[in-house]
Amino acid sequence: AQSVSQHNHHVILSEAASLELGCNYSYGGTVNLFWYVQYPGQHLQLLLKYFSGDPLVKGIKGFEAEFIKSKFSFNLRKPSVQWSDTAEYFCAVSDSGNTGKLIFGQGTTLQVKP
Amino acid sequence: GAVVSQHPSWVICKSGTSVKIECRSLDFQATTMFWYRQFPKQSLMLMATSNEGSKATYEQGVEKDKFLINHASLTLSTLTVTSAHPEDSSFYICSATTPLGTYEQYFGPGTRLTVT
């Protein structure tokens, strides 16, 4: 069965610090990878996604993620965080079949101090 | 575009009663809708996949007789928690995908259910 693991449960950073959130998945086949963000009191929003092609994908709000197939990883990065990036971040994976089912990681709470 | 709404946003019910939660795609037709459950400070757990006009597919461990899902139209799916108990208290979130096949899910704002 597929699973997703996010290594950092709670991250505290100061503004302008660089961010990297780890995500590893276990699945032997072809996968689609996603990062979602949930701002306080809001619904989940898509940050970025990887289906195929360039393993370095760029998303909204300056976020990017790199798919490293050999490491089964899809880490999220941002060079300089802002206070407004304070949120819960979820990595998710779906198989490349047509079900569209998502398996989510445990989530990482990011707190950015002004 | 691609807005998903849920109603109600918050509901309190007594143990033993049933509660219906609606999930609507407001500006697109959703061939597939998903229902998730999220416990405090935890991730989303997929409960079931709902396709318009057919029976829902439940994940292992989810009681289909307790969590009734109906997807009667391309814009509406409902989740009914039957004979609710305090342990069913949780945050229920739905999502929807478009027929475009991009597998991107659009999430509703969630419904907080409290069973007393």
Image: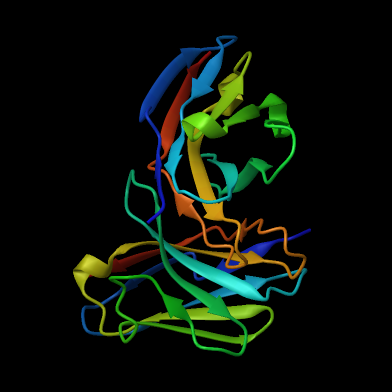
Q: How many marks?
A: 0
Answer with left or right where residue A55 lies relative to residue B6: right
Q: Is residue A88 left or right of residue B11?
A: right
Position of the N terminus of chain A, as image quadrant, is bottom left
Image position of B97 with respect to A15: above or below: below
Say if residue A41 shows up in the picture: no
User: In the depicted view, which residue is nearer to us: A49 or B41?
Assistant: A49
Q: Give me the residue at 56% from left, 28% from top.
A: A76
Residue A50 horizontal side relative to residue A7, left or right = right
**Residue A26 at what x, y percent from top left?**
42, 44
**Residue A25 sits in quarter:** top left
Residue A72 x/y as whole percent: 48, 35
Residue B24 falls in which quadrant of the image?
bottom right
Vertically, is A72 above or below A112? below
Q: Position of residue B49 (x, y in %)?
A: 50, 73
Residue A66 seen in the figure: yes
A104 versus B102 height, above or below: above
Residue A109, horizontal then vertical, whole percent:
42, 32
Residue occupying the point 59% across, 44% down: A34
Residue drawn at point x = 66 percent, y = 42 percent: A50
Compare residues B95 and A99 and report the one nearer the observer: A99
